[in-house]
Image (cartoon, rainbow, N blue to C red):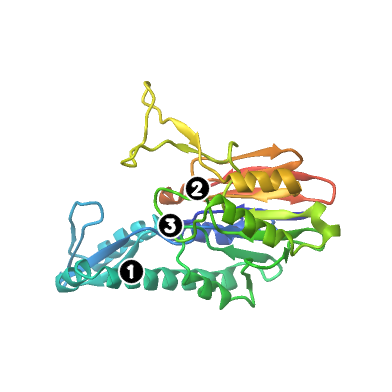
């Protein structure tokens, strides 16, 4: 038997990542995967006014600090929620506001620095006999791939190759998703996604395909794994008469069609935070752990694999 721990959508949360590092030991996993949307979504500048005085403005409300310890404590909370922080001046902020390309460059720099710290922690904390797979997702800029690849002596970068979970189960991966309202870095039309998936499938030996695992960030369409709140043209959540959000299927039709056509043994998915679930599509077990990264909660699936069957259960904490 081989045990997998699968988690997704950490979105820059230091606390989620630290919990992830403990998952291998906690769940006695042989393989751990953190696949998709590694990076955070916003920067919080820390403006130094004078000696022992700083302010931040994370949610449109100014917060002032007169103690370096108190400031550090507050920034730790923000970083656990996935935000990036950096010390700056009013003048530099004004310059950044007038130079979007400088903001983009700074954002990329901060994302790469945190990911580098995270991957060094993997090398220090996760036992050497545990396989570690780290994959970007649709929200992640292309530049972060070089950070992951620089650690390939310990961490597996799974794109554009077949990765063997064990001596029986080949795995193929794809980080792209179908179009979203946010126009994230790794989106593609369904036709192009299907071409990507079939290209990866072609890498697998024909006699091994019945044991195939598909690590696709996009969940399959019209399942419990792809339900998200419906949005109007202004990206506001559409609600029902009782005030609850109206839910719609937003997953990939190409991923669904691929699974129905090829019947892999297991599908590992993510992307839709609200849709933590597992189910079957024909013979294939598909799972999405969901994400609650802003609360610092690690969500994952433990999957036990044998040549004959799959057992899985969702965990969080």
Mark 2 residue element: loop
Q: Residue furthest front?
A: 191
Residue carrying label 1: 104
Is residue 274 or residue 246 the one in the foreground? Answer: 246
Sequence order check: which comes first, mark 2 or mark 1?
A: 1
Mark 3 nearby-residue class (10 Å; few <14, some 14–19, many ≥20)? some
Is residue 129 or residue 68 the one in the foreground? Answer: 129
Label for residue 184?
Answer: 3
Q: Residue 249 placed where, x, y %?
A: 52, 37
Q: Marks 3 and 1, how far apart in space? A: 14 Å
Q: Are marks 3 and 1 in contact (CB under 8 Å)?
A: no
Residue under the image location 39 percent in, 70 percent down: 108
Q: Quadrant of residue 288?
A: top right
Q: Mark 2 or 1, which is nearer the eye?
A: 1
Q: Marks 2 and 1, how far apart in space? A: 25 Å
* Residue 111 left/right relative to 256: left
Q: Mark 2 or 3, which is nearer the eye?
A: 3
Q: Is residue 114 above or below residue 74?
A: below
Residue carrying label 2: 291
Q: Is residue 276 above or below residue 217?
A: above
């Amino acid at each position: 038997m081989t045990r997998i721990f699968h988690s997704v959508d950490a979105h820059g949360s230091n606390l989620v990542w630290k919990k992830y590092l403990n998952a291998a030991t906690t769940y006695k996993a042989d393989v751990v995967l953190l696949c998709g949307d590694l990076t955070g979504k916003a920067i919080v500048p820390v403006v130094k006014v004078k000696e022992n005085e700083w302010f931040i403005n994370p949610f449109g409300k100014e917060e002032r600090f007169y103690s370096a310890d108190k400031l550090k404590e507050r920034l730790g909370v923000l970083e656990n929620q996935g935000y990036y922080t950096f010390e700056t001046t009013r003048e530099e902020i004004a310059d950044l506001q007038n130079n979007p390309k400088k903001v983009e460059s700074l954002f990329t720099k901060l994302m790469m620095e945190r990911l580098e710290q995270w991957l060094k922690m993997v090398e220090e904390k996760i036992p050497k006999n545990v396989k570690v797979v780290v994959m970007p997702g649709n929200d992640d800029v292309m530049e972060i791939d070089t950070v992951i690849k620089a650690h390939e002596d310990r961490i597996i970068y799974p794109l554009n190759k077949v990765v063997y979970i064990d001596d029986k189960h080949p795995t193929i991966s794809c980080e792209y998703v179908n179009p979203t309202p946010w126009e994230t870095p790794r989106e593609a039309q369904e036709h192009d996604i299907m071409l990507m998936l079939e290209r990866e499938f072609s890498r697998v030996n024909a006699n091994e395909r019945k044991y195939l695992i598909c690590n696709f960030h996009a969940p399959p369409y019209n399942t419990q794994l792809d339900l998200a709140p419906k949005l109007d043209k202004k990206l506001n959540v559409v609600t029902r008469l009782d005030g609850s959000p109206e839910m719609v299927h937003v997953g990939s039709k190409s991923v669904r069609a691929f699974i129905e056509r090829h019947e892999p043994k297991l599908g590992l998915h993510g992307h839709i935070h609200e849709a933590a679930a597992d189910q079957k599509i024909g013979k294939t077990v598909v799972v999405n752990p969901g994400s609650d990264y802003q609360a610092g909660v690690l969500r994952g699936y433990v999957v036990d694999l044998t040549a004959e069957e799959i057992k899985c259960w969702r965990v969080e904490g």
